[in-house]
Image (cartoon, grey):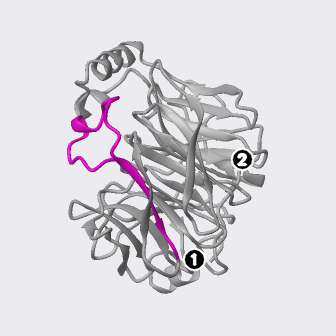
Amino acid sequence: MRIDRIHPLTRAPHPELLWAGRDLVAPRGVLAHGAGSLITTDGRGGVTFIDPLGERVVHHRGADAMMAHAVLPHGPGSVCLVGARDGAGCVAVLKADGTLQPLLTAVDGAPLPPVADIARDGMGRLFITIPTHHAALEDAARPDVADGMIVLCPPVGAARVVARHLHYPAGCVVSADGSQLFVNETFGRATIAFDITATGSLEGPMGLAQYGDGLFPMGLADDTEGGLWVSSLVSRTVLRLSPGRGRRLVLQERDETRVSAVERAFGAFTLTAARLFAPARARLPDLAGLAFGGPDGGHLLLGNFDGSAIPILPVDVAGRTPNFPDGFFGPLVAAGVLPADWPGA
């Protein structure tokens, strides 16, 4: 990603911010390819590709659109998506030809509730977060509700629930050595850690950070020094948690009126989706997933709920970036999804 050639994010209050893309719709999840392109989830279904200059934007949804919340590379020309399809949760592979191949739609004999995020370990096992079994956010956005869970989807064998009774688990990431799974509990207002056993079961959780005052942790990414980067709803905040559990404020743009209104409603057990996502006097979008990209992983990509582009923040610690298969873009060019001169094809 040649970020130096992307124009500064002029609508952000922080001059160091950049942005990529245009006319995006709810780009909650985001990935960066080593050749410079970005891949985001799209509120119209499927994914969007953004070229390294941030100028060409290509929407790819296929014939059977899925509302994805997070995305991982899969095989050449394909991505693994998690989110919702026809109102139920789904983990599926979107291929270059537009085919959507479901990987998981049920667990323990019951339909899968909508999925928030996905993380893959070095053995190819997928950990997915299920925030709630409630259909309405109003019934889940409460401090006394803990019906979220984490599901393990192994490369071979049946998926199974490996953690229950969580407070709206959302962003998740596997540690570099594969020994731990880190998870944000959005309405538990915490970041927690599980130990991963040899069989993929989870032990714990252990508390890493507890939040308040407008902080509702959503996105989660890790860096090469073992730090965790956390994005928050409502207060438009990014924090870094150091391995020693120190906490550093990286970015924030608060609308104090909106923060106060959300805090009152949450404390009174009356928080609604309309209140949670109400317009704010802020130029940053409401933040969602996080990922690293750019030269040496030195840029933090800010997925979001309501923006039309991806804000990009240069940071002082290199982040861990995803591994893409060789020739990833080739099948997408062959299928006519991307032009022949797409970088990295």
Name the foreground residue: 82 vs 22.
82
Q: What residue type is labelled 2?
A: Asp
Q: Is 225 situated left or right of 63 in this image?
A: right
Q: Which residue: 72% across, 57% down?
A: 176
> Depth check: 111 or 136 in front?
111
Say whether residue 301 is magenta.
no
**Residue 264 in the figure: left or right of residue 172:** left
Is residue 146 visible in the rendered image? The answer is yes
Q: Distance between the residues labelled 1 and 2?
A: 26 Å
Residue 130 appears in the figure? no
Badge 2 marks a residue whose secondary structure is loop
Residue at x 37%, y 40% (from the top left corner): 306
Q: Where is residue 57 in the image (x, y as percent from the top left)?
A: 47, 60
Q: Residue 172 carries which label?
A: none
Q: Which is nearer the N-term, disc 1 or disc 2?
A: 2
Residue with the mark numbered 2:
223
